[in-house]
Image (cartoon, grey):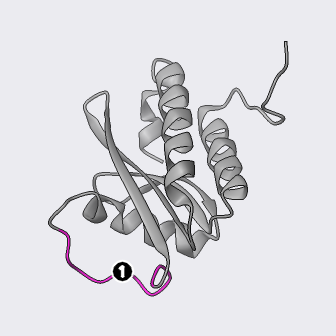
C-alpha cells in the first residue's frame, strides 16, 4: 500500500501542524490556521505573526456580517475561512495567500476533521492550546 504522507505524528497537535504545513506548502500560501470561537490559535503553519493575525480574525471573517478591516499582515491577500462544528465547539480553518487558497482550504478541512475526530477521545483539551 502506498503511503502518501511522508511525515506523520501520533501526537494530535503535531499531526495537525504537519497537515496544515503540507497544505500551506502545496498551495503556496502564507499561512493556514485552526482557531476557535474567541480567536485563539489552536494550530498554524506559516510565520507566527501572520498565523496569530489570521486566527484572531477567522471567527469574524467566518460570519457574513463582518465589514471591518483586516490586520495589516493580511491586507492585500486572499483570505478564506471555513467554520465547522466539532463536538459542540465552532472551529475555524483559514488560509491566507496571494491566491488559490480555496482548494487548499478544502484539503485542510478534511485533514483537520480527520485528526480531531481520531484524537478527541484521547485528548479533549486539544482545542485549548
Q: Is residue 46 left or right of residue 74?
A: right
Locate residue 111: give its quadrant.
top right
10 on left or right of 88: right
Residue 29 is a magenta residue: no
Picture residue at 53% right of the left edge, 20% below the top: 118
Q: Looking at the rendering, in which quadrant would you find the N terminus? A: top right
At x 51%, y 37%, the residue is 112
Main secondary-structure element of the magenta-colored stretch: loop
Q: Is residue 69 left or right of residue 16?
A: left
Magenta part of the protein: which range? 66-75
Residue that numbered label 1 is attached to: 70
Looking at the picture, does residue 47 appear above or below residue 117? below
Front-lying residue, 45 or 80: 80
Q: Secondary structure at mark 1?
A: loop
Mark 1 surroundings: few (<14), some (14-19) or many (≥20) residues within 10 A: some
| Residue occupying image coordinates x 58% and y 64% | 31
Nearest the eye: 81 or 122: 81
The residue closer to the viewer here, 10 or 64, is 64
* Residue 104 percent coordinates (x, y): 57, 50
Q: Percent position (x, y) of residue 121?
A: 46, 17
Give the residue at x 48% y 37%: 126
In this view, which residue lies farthest toward the bottom? Answer: 72
In which image quadrant can residue 56 be found?
bottom left
Q: Is residue 76 above or below residue 86?
A: below
Amino acid at each position: 500500500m502506498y503511503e502518501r504522507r511522508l511525515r506523520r505524528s501520533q501526537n494530535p497537535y503535531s499531526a495537525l501542524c504537519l497537515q496544515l504545513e503540507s497544505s500551506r506548502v502545496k498551495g503556496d500560501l502564507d499561512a493556514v490556521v485552526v482557531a476557535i470561537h474567541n480567536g485563539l490559535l489552536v494550530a498554524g503553519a506559516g510565520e507566527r505573526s501572520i498565523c496569530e493575525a489570521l486566527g484572531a480574525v477567522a471567527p469574524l471573517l467566518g460570519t457574513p456580517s463582518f465589514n471591518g478591516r483586516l490586520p495589516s499582515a493580511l491586507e492585500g491577500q486572499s483570505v478564506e475561512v471555513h467554520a465547522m462544528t466539532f463536538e459542540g465547539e465552532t472551529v475555524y480553518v483559514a488560509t491566507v495567500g496571494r491566491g488559490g487558497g480555496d482548494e487548499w482550504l478544502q484539503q485542510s478541512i478534511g485533514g483537520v476533521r480527520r485528526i480531531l475526530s481520531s484524537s478527541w477521545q484521547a485528548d479533549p483539551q486539544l482545542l485549548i492550546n
